[in-house]
Image: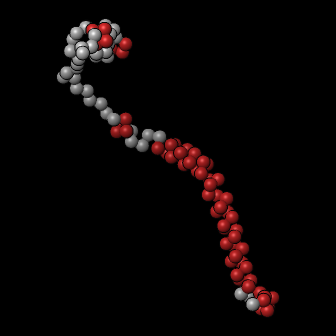
Amino acid sequence: MRPTLALRGGGESPLGKNGHFLGGWGNFGGMKQKGIITYSLSPNKQNVLAGTAHAAVFNVWRRFSKQVLFWAPPLVFFYYAMDWATHRNHYLNSKQGRAEFADSE
C-alpha cells in the first residue's frame, strides 16, 4: 500500500520528492547539505582549567554535606567505644584492676 501525498509531504516541502517526509515546522526534510566543513575549538581546549578550583571546593562541600550524617555518627560512636575499651583494658591489667577483680575469675 502506498502512503498518501498528504502524509508524505506536510508543511512547505514539495510533495512527491524523494526523502521529504516531514517539512514546515523546523524545516525537517530540507535540502541535504554537501561540501560544508566547519572547524571549531572545543570548549575544554580553550581554557582547560576554567573554574576547576571553584567547582572543586563547592562540589566537595556538596558531596560531604550530603554524606556526613551516614558515616559521622557511627564513627563517633565506635571511636568512644574503642577509647572506653582501651582504658578499661589498661585498668583491668593494672595493679588496682587486678586487685579489684582478682577473685571474680
Q: Among all residues in the image, which is located at the extreme front?
A: 1
- Give the quadrant of the N terminus: top left
Name the spot of residue 83 as percent of width and height, x first. Answer: 69, 72
Residue in front for this viewpoint, 29 or 9: 9
Q: Nearer the viewer, residue 71 or 58?
A: 71
Q: Quadrant of the C terminus?
A: bottom right
Quadrant assignment, res 82? bottom right
Give the image's coloring scheme: secondary structure
Q: Quadrant of residue 48?
A: top left
Going 56% across and 48% down the picture, which residue do you hit? Answer: 63
* Residue 76 can be seen in this image: yes
Residue 17 to residue 46: above or below: above
| Above or below for 53 versus 26 | below
Relative depth, front residue between 62 and 19: 19
* Horizontal side of residue 18 vs 105, given as left or right: left
Q: Residue at x 37, y 13 (%)?
A: 25
* Residue 43 vertical position relative to residue 26 in the rendered view, above or below: below
Determine whether, in the image, residue 22 is placed left or right of residue 54: left
The picture places residue 37, in percent across and down from the top left corner, at 22, 26
What's the residue at 57%, 45% (across, down)? Answer: 62
- Residue 89: percent from the left, percent from the top? 70, 81
Residue sitting farthest toward the left: 35
Q: Is residue 87 above or below residue 20?
A: below
Is residue 59 toward the left or the right of residue 24 in the image?
A: right
Q: What is the number of callouts on the image?
A: 0
Question: Which residue is painted at 33% across and 8% down in the image?
Answer: 11
Q: Residue furthest right?
A: 100
Q: Is residue 54 left or right of residue 102?
A: left
Q: Is residue 13 visible?
A: no
